[in-house]
Image (spheres, rainbow, N blue to C red):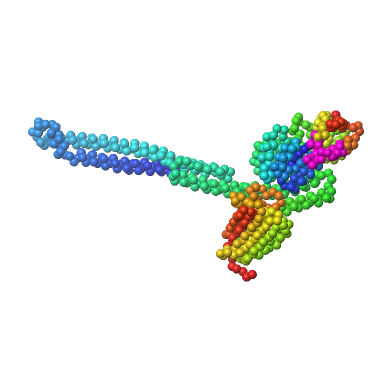
């Protein structure tokens, strides 16, 4: 899952981004409205975590512009304002969810995951295909009940493959959805992760390579 | 019935009309009666003339008696009718005038009830409401406008208070959010190495220092706003020297050229607050600067006032933004302090402390950077 975090407090952005990555999300960070709009113009995100109080272009303005776009990420607003009226304002701007600072990190993860699930037909909280199950909130992937002990990145890749429901996931799509903007598209990091994932998932193999195109779990 | 102004005005109209009308009709009645009474022989002659010569030869006495008798009866009847008519007219007109007075008073006083209604409605939540009385520029409009001006001042005061609290709450929550997020993420991490823990501790420490700074600044501001001063003689030059010494490292880090011209500038005031004032000015000049820029600090006694001037280079400030600089949690127009520098209360504290000492802070932008001048009432010159 690809997330853009817009937060001007460097320490807070650091901590949250690090945490979300442990939950196998691909996280890009923008420190102000301008940078956020630029990233939004370049990449497709599933969820935008947006601080409301940004220097320069405000969070409200970013939200307005994002909501006006056609395929748009879900927007989760963060604010340090204490007033309930603020929450109402946030929703009025088109935010999909709202969280007040200081927040419980687990709650943030749960809300982001829930927001991403809202896309398309209602998806089950636990992804399943054949013997494989993946629970994003527990950070667990199992095969026939056995915990696979995946790293965050491997979980992220498996999740994209499972979400395709048997469809082929191109290498580009995998790169976009499971890696953040610092990924080098020419490195073989993806191949390495897929290899490790295959090894952990074990026999008989379930991840097929579609030569010259991508991967799928039939 | 409550003796309202409207009721009293209506009654006043009625009484005034009753008195005026009564006098008028009374006079009229007296004049009529007088003229009827005073023309005895003349009237008799007129009757005799009308009757013609036939009546002239009749017995004078009997004739005169009949005429006088008739005339008296007619006169009394006429006066009675006149009196009845006058009394009735006066009564009707008085009632009418009372009603008219009631209506007119109501009309004249309607703006007052508007003012009352607004005053009743206005509370902390809707201080932005105004009477905005239309109509002639009279006493009531003046009252309404005065009331509106007062509301505007109250509104501004409440608004600035609200905004201060909102900003302060925002500023206090931010370090808490950082601590909370950092701790949560670390606790939920799968592998917690010593390195990660140390990194977390550093962030948490930074965030809590930021809270402390902010709380100190808020307390200083509160104390100075309250005017709770412990006065003693103090030399601004000493304070400037201390501040420069404490901030020397920071100035060096930014590669700033620091010029100081510290002539003795005796003042009387609260040591801790004045120290904060001078330190904030110097800190401000150092932090809002460009690498390789300059800072100039001077103190002097001038016309019985103690003056400290802190100037710095760096980007020019729009003149209209100068007023904003002393507003809490504002920096260069943006209502956010962001980043790690200061509490966002620096110049607010300077301004407040200066005013608490009956002095003033003046800000000027001479094309680059900022010149901050604080003038305080001077104290007795101290030796050295």
Question: How far from the left and from the top, in percent, is residue B117?
Answer: 51, 42
Q: Is residue A192 magenta?
A: yes
Judge by depth and name the residue closer to the eye, B358 or A169.
Answer: A169
Residue lying at the far left of the rendered structure: B57
Quadrant where the C terminus of chain A sits is top right
Residue B356 seen in render: no
Question: How far from the left and from the top, in percent, is residue A14?
Answer: 76, 46
In the picture, measured across the screen, residue A91 lies left or right of residue B54, that is right
In the picture, measured across the screen, residue B58 lies left or right of residue B86, that is left
Residue at horizontal 68 percent and vertical 41 percent from the top? A59
Question: How far from the left and from the top, in percent, is residue B292?
Answer: 70, 56
Judge by depth and name the residue closer to the eye, B346 or B321.
Answer: B321
Residue B10 seen in render: yes
Residue at horizontal 28 percent and vertical 40 percent from the top? B25
In the picture, measured across the screen, residue A7 lies left or right of residue B88, that is right
Residue at horizontal 62 percent and vertical 56 percent from the top? B371
Query: How many discs appear?
Result: 0
Tell me where residue B370 sits by quadrant.
Answer: bottom right
Question: How far from the left and from the top, in percent, is residue B59?
Answer: 9, 34
Tell me where residue B287 sits by quadrant.
Answer: bottom right
Quadrant where the N terminus of chain A sits is top right
In the picture, measured across the screen, residue B272 lies left or right of residue B200, that is left
Measured along the vertical axis of the image, is residue B322 above or below residue A52? below
Residue at horizontal 79 percent and vertical 32 percent from the top? A124
Residue lying at the far right of the rendered structure: A203
The magenta span reads A173-194
Q: Is residue B10 magenta?
A: no
């Amino acid at each position: 899952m690809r997330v853009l975090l817009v937060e001007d407090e460097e320490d807070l952005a650091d901590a949250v981004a690090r945490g979300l990555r442990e939950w196998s999300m691909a996280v890009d960070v923008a420190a102000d409205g301008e940078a956020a709009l630029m990233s939004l113009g370049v990449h497709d995100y599933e969820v935008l975590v947006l601080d409301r109080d940004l220097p320069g272009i405000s969070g409200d303005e970013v939200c307005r512009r994002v909501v006006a776009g056609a395929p748009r990420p879900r927007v989760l607003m963060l604010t340090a304002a204490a007033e309930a009226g603020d929450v109402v304002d946030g929703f009025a701007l088109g935010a999909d969810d709202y969280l007040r600072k200081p927040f419980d990190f687990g709650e943030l993860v749960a809300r982001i995951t829930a927001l991403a699930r809202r896309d398309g037909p209602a998806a089950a909280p636990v992804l399943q295909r054949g013997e494989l199950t993946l629970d994003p909130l527990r950070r667990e992937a199992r095969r026939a009940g056995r915990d696979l002990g995946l790293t965050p990145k491997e979980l992220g890749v498996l999740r994209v493959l499972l979400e395709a429901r048997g469809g082929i996931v191109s290498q580009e799509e995998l790169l976009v959805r499971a890696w953040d903007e610092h990924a080098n598209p020419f490195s073989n990091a993806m191949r390495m992760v897929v290899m490790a994932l295959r090894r952990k998932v074990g026999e008989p193999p379930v991840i097929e390579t579609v030569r010259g195109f991508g991967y799928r779990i039939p | 019935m409550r003796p309202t102004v409207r009721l009293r005005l209506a009654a006043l109209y009625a009484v005034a009309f009753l008195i005026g009308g009564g006098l008028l009709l009374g006079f009229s009645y007296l004049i009529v009666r007088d003229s009827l009474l005073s023309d005895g022989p003349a009237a008799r002659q007129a009757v005799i003339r009308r009757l013609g010569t036939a009546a002239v030869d009749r017995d004078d006495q009997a004739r005169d008696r009949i005429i006088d008798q008739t005339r008296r009866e007619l006169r009394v009847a006429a006066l009675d009718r006149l009196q009845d008519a006058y009394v009735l007219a006066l009564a009707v007109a008085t009632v009418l005038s009372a009603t008219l007075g009631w209506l007119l008073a109501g009309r004249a006083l309607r703006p007052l009830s508007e003012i009352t209604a607004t005053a009743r409605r206005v509370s902390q939540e809707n201080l932005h409401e105004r009477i905005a009385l239309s109509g002639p520029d009279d006493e009531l409009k003046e009252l309404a406008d005065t009331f509106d001006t007062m509301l505007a001042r109250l509104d501004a005061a409440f608004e600035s208070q609200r905004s201060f609290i909102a900003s302060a709450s925002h500023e206090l929550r931010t370090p808490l959010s950082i601590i909370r997020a950092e701790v949560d993420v670390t606790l939920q991490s799968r592998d917690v190495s010593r390195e990660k823990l140390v990194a977390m501790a550093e962030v948490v420490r930074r965030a809590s220092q930021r809270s402390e700074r902010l709380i100190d600044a808020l307390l200083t501001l509160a104390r100075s706003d309250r005017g709770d001063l412990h006065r003693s003689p103090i030399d601004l030059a000493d304070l400037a020297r201390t501040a420069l010494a404490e901030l020397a490292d920071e100035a060096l880090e930014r590669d700033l050229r620091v010029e100081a011209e510290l002539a003795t500038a005796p003042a009387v005031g609260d040591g801790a607050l004045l120290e904060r004032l001078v330190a904030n000015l110097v800190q401000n000049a150092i932090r809002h600067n460009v690498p390789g820029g300059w800072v100039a600090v001077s103190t002097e006694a001038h016309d019985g006032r103690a003056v400290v001037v802190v100037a710095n280079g760096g980007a020019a400030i729009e003149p209209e933004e100068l007023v904003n600089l002393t507003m809490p949690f504002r920096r260069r127009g943006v209502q956010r302090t962001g980043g790690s520098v200061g509490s966002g209360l620096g110049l607010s504290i300077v301004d407040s402390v200066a005013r608490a000492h009956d002095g003033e802070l003046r800000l000027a932008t001479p094309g680059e950077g900022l010149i901050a001048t604080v003038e305080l009432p001077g104290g007795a010159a101290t030796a050295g």
